[in-house]
Image (tube, rainbow, N blue to C red):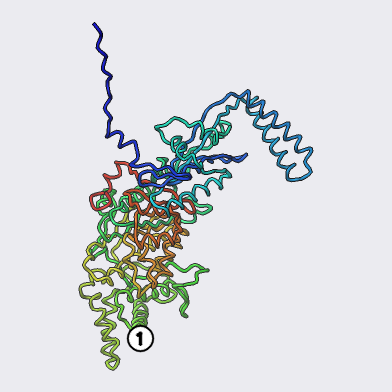
Amino acid sequence: MLGSKKKEEVLPVNEALLNVITPMGLEIKRNSLVIGENLGKVYGAIRYPQKVDMGWLSKITNIPSTIVSVGITPIDNGALISAISKSIVQQRGAADSAKDPLTRQRAEKAAEDGERIMQRIDQEGETVAMMSLTVMPIAQDEANFTKVCRRVESAFNIQKCKVRTLANLQKEGFQSISPTYPANSTVDSIVSRIIPMSTFVGGFPFASSGYNDGRGYYFAKDSNGGLVILDTWERGNDRTNSSFVIMGVAGIGKSTVVKHIMLSEYMKGTKILCIDPESEYKDMCRNLNGSWLNAGGGKNGRSNLLQIRPAPRDEDDETDKLYTDEGNGMSDMALHMKTLEIEFSLYLPSLTDMQKAILKQTIIELYNQFGIFWETDIRQLKATDFPILSDLHALLEKKAEANKENPVYRDLAMLLYDAAAGSDSFLWNGHTTLEANSRFICLDTHDLQNASDNVKRTQYLNLLSWCWEEMSRDRNERCLLVCDEAYLMIDPQVPQSLVFLRNVEKRARKYEAGLAIISHSVVDFLAPEVKMYGQALLDIPCYKILMGCDGKNLQETKDLYNLTDAEQELLESKRRGHALFIIGSKRLHVNFEIPAYKFSYMGKAGGR
């Protein structure tokens, strides 16, 4: 009886797995590839420099929008030593017989390098290997593909390496890069070069080590998972101040990042001052046993507009000075008169030049009645020694009665009635009750949400002047002022309010203080009316955290900070918690992975 033929088992094709590991379509061209919806081109590195710096490989294998394959095959040292020895003899002979100085110099250098590597291999036990390196830039459209290819060629040229397109070998090059194929012998024969293992290993020294000041606190992680350890009070080289600018669209994680920085600085002993228009920091302030002050009309949050405070003077080399000597010297009272002029211009934008002049004259007379003159040392005065707005209103009323033929006094009295006795009197009419009696002070202006922009801007500047008094009180105490929603200060009609903020930012470093500007868009600060002053606010800070943005905001950010294509792509992606972090002249892609314990302090209002 004949035996029946055994049936062969046919393994079913796993279509799902096949779809995952294979591209939608693959077209092989002479010098490029089409992989699904992406364009690609495989390059091979065919020459390396005689000397390389530490980390040289990490700079050519971390190019955005590229796939890189590095192959290492250890080889026998004996044959290599013999080959190097023969090469040294040839180079020495070429150097002796060369008539051209350049040829002789190059031959001598090659012989010296050969002797050095032969000594390392033969006497010091250096291991050598065959290294092959292929790189494939990819992009979804022709324009970006050309940019990425140019970026790859430039990166290799900077490292003094030479790459060539694998013409007619794009398929084999793609196979050598793909993890589903073994090394391709044809490609390896073109791109394999002998190098010492120390050169290969030294090509990735701490490639994921992030950024480390050696002291400070955990700030974030870089794109490779390395820690970013930052000391914001470090000085030297391009680290000239401790100020921040933090920009990003709503919901991208700005508030979380700001609270993370505030908590870290607080733990390091820094005094925190915060102007909070959205009541986002109230819970955190109370969790840290700080002072929460209702600066939107609360009895413990009043700041007297007429109380003279130290002003942030202009730098000597400043071209657009805020303060100039108008014949009364540069005393604290003279400087405060300029601050008052800005505040009243913000509060009452309809004031004419004549009304401003008479109001200024009346305020000076009021100060004199209270025993305050140009040369008075205000440090000797208490908060109750200064006049308040109802005193100013009463003096204007008195002058209106005495000068009935001049309607300006009557008009000023009517215009200032709200601030002295009306709905705005809760903010400003009274002696200052703000007190800095803790290391975390939150000035909450949330109650002003329904107030006019004029009131918000005036109160913001008023609180800023109080904060500057606290920041400049002790040059040895570190202090960080956080200005959230800083765009609220911008008034195209009164750009001097931004000049005040610029002066605070510039002078803060001299008082061991820092300023954090937080807003949604750089466009607010770069409007034609305020660009001269607003751009300085974005340029001066040493630390810039740029989170997701798009449209005109992205274009302005790109032009302002000269962003590369890769940095622009990072901001366009708008990934929550990811940012471009600029530290002086250095730039990092960071991911804010915040420890869980910090969230218990942050509270529930925003930034979670």
Q: Please tell me whether mark 1 sits on a helix, a strand or a loop.
A: helix
| Viewer-side residue, 348 vs 82 | 82
Location of mark 1 (residue): 354
Q: Is residue 211 visible?
A: no
Residue at the front extreme?
A: 1
In percent of width and height, residue 15 lies at 27, 33
In percent of width and height, residue 250 lies at 29, 56
Q: Residue 452's quadrant in the figure?
A: bottom left
Residue at the top extreme?
A: 1
Dot 1: few (<14), some (14–19), or many (≥20) neighbours within 10 Å? few
Q: Viewed as shown, does residue 431 lie left or right of 89?
A: left
In percent of width and height, residue 498 lies at 39, 68
Please determine whether, in this image, residue 26 is positioned above or below residue 123. below
Please determine whether, in this image, residue 342 is positioned above or below residue 602. below
Give amino acid for label 1.
Met
Please determine whether, in this image, residue 536 is positioned above or below residue 8. below
Q: Is residue 134 visible?
A: yes
Write the residue at 34% across / 37% down: 22
Q: Viewed as shown, does residue 315 lie left or right of 607?
A: right
